[in-house]
Amino acid sequence: MALTDAKSKGFHDPQITAQEYEYIRKLVYDHCRINLGPNKKELVMARLSKRLRACNINTYKVYIQLLQSPAGKSEMGNLIDAISTNHTYFFREGEHFAYLNEHILPEFAAAHHGSGQFRVWSAACSSGEEPYSVAILLNEYFRNQKNRWSIESSDISAKILKRANDGVFAKDRVERIRKDWLCRYFLKGNGKFDGLYQFHPEVRRNLTFRLINLMSRSFPYSQPFHLILCRNVMIYFDRPTQEDLINRLAKYLRPGGYLFIGHSESLNAIKHPLKLIQPAIYQLPN
């Protein structure tokens, strides 16, 4: 397919018509259930302007033609990357980490008497701060006990998932971490890597990263989890999608397992099998 050469004609951020916006809105919703309402039109144009430049396209009509072409499958990933919000930081929503450390892990230890593996799924891990934060707590708790924990991490964005998998963070991204933990769990870069910190490879072995769309009808896990974190994701979904997702996630919890959602989210208006423990913390009854 021949594309308009934006460079040769001079690129100006194009306007999107109501029909073009509705096509993209529906395409995103069908793919990952992100619900872009009528008031998100300006946001979509701002997010997609870089994609149009990258493709040397200067109209949304031609961009939609690209999405409909054989090359559209690859570009769909770039579209979702552009639309998705990946705002996160280490130990975000600290009440969750306190509850994990003070309640969930002691419960697990008492029930298993020094055996068993504590399994976690970070179901929308973004750039990795969430699963690495959990990893620090688990490694601290199970210090000197090998193979006592594992973390599965997933995201819909291939680009952001690669960053998470690399485990490399700029100095300003690790400033919230306790100084002793920063020294213990991160390798400080030197020379051309000055200002960068890499999560320690030895601890990193306990984490696995996978590209997963949460709208998939099943997930690639054969063993249930003691804890699933699905935080600050459902704010982009409508109620039917939220209910469907929570009930599917519940099937991957062990009896007595926990689900953490974002503190700005609630399950009050949907049907599910979980018991509210405290705000944003739910448990699957035994």
Image (cartoon, rainbow, N blue to C red):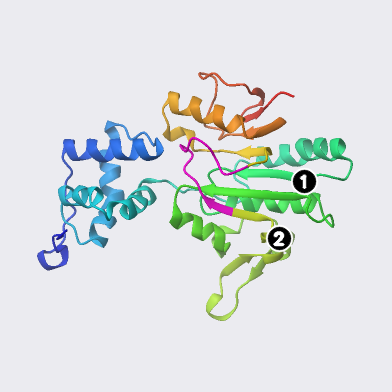
In the rendered image, the residue lying farthest to the right is 113
Picture quadrant of residue 145: bottom right
Magenta segment: does it hold 239?
Answer: no
- The tag earlier along the polypeptide, 2 or 1, is 1
Picture quadrant of residue 196: bottom right
Residue drawn at (81%, 51%), measured in percent from left and top?
142
Q: Is residue 130 above or below residue 26?
A: below
* First to last magenta residue range: 209-221
Q: Are marks 2 and 1 in contact (CB under 8 Å)?
A: no
Q: Badge 1: few (under 14), some or many (20 or more) residues near its Cα, within 10 Å?
A: some
Q: Is residue 267 above or below residue 249?
A: above
Residue drawn at (55%, 35%), measured in percent from left and top?
262
Q: How many numbered callouts?
A: 2
Q: Is residue 38 above or below residue 160?
A: above
Q: Circle 2 is placed at which residue position?
A: 203
Which percent across, then down, holds residue 112?
85, 39
Amino acid type, label 1 = Gln
Residue drawn at (18%, 58%), measured in percent from left and top?
57
Tell me, yes or no, if residue 55 can be seen here.
yes
**Residue in the foreground of this view, choosing between 142 and 26:** 26
Disc 2 to disc 1, C-alpha distance? 15 Å
Tell me, yes or no, if residue 200 can be seen here.
no
Q: Nearer the viewer, mark 2 or mark 1?
A: 1
**Residue in the foreground of this view, choosing between 55 and 170:** 55
**Residue in the foreground of this view, choosing between 2 and 282:** 2
Which percent across, then down, holds residue 139?
76, 54
**97 left or right, relative to 141:** left
Query: Any mark on residue 117, and which?
Result: 1
